[in-house]
Image: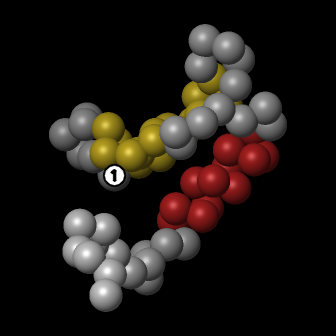
C-alpha cells in the first residue's frame, strides 16, 4: 500500500491510500491549504493502527 500526496483542481493538497492492486481504499475527504497539514493527516491515519472499530448499526441501550 502507498499514500499519494497530490493537488486537486482547486490547488488544495489531498492524500489517498492505494492498495497494491491500484484501488483507492481511503482518501483525505477534504483539501488542505498547506502541504504540512495534509502530511499531518497522513500521519494521523498511519498512527491509528490501534483504533477500535465501533459498529454504528447497533442500538445503544
**Residue drawn at x 32%, y 81% as measured from the top left:** 60
Question: Does the image show residue 53?
Answer: no
Q: Which residue is mark 1?
A: 1
Location of residue 46 with respect to 31 vertically, above or below: below
Q: Is residue 56 above or below residue 11?
A: below
Q: How dense is the environment of label 1, judged by Cα within 10 Å: few (below 14), some, or many (20 and up)? A: few
Q: Residue 41, position in %: x, y?
A: 63, 53
Q: Position of residue 18 (x, y in %)?
A: 34, 42
Residue 9, percent across and down?
61, 12
Name the quadrant containing residue 52. Answer: bottom left
In the picture, measured across the screen, residue 5 lies left or right of residue 26, that is right
User: Residue at 31% across / 87% down in the picture?
Assistant: 61
Q: Position of residue 34 (x, y in %)?
A: 80, 37
Q: Residue at x 52, y 62 (%)?
A: 45
What is the number of callouts on the image? 1
- Residue 6 in sight: yes
Please state which of residues 14 and 56 is positioned toward the viewer in this rendering: 56
Amino acid at each position: 500500500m502507498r499514500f499519494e500526496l497530490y493537488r486537486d483542481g482547486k490547488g488544495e493538497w489531498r492524500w489517498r491510500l492505494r492498495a497494491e492492486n491500484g484501488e483507492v481504499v481511503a482518501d483525505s475527504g477534504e483539501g488542505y491549504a498547506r502541504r504540512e497539514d495534509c502530511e499531518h493527516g497522513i500521519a494521523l491515519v498511519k498512527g491509528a493502527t490501534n483504533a477500535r472499530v465501533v459498529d454504528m448499526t447497533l442500538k445503544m441501550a
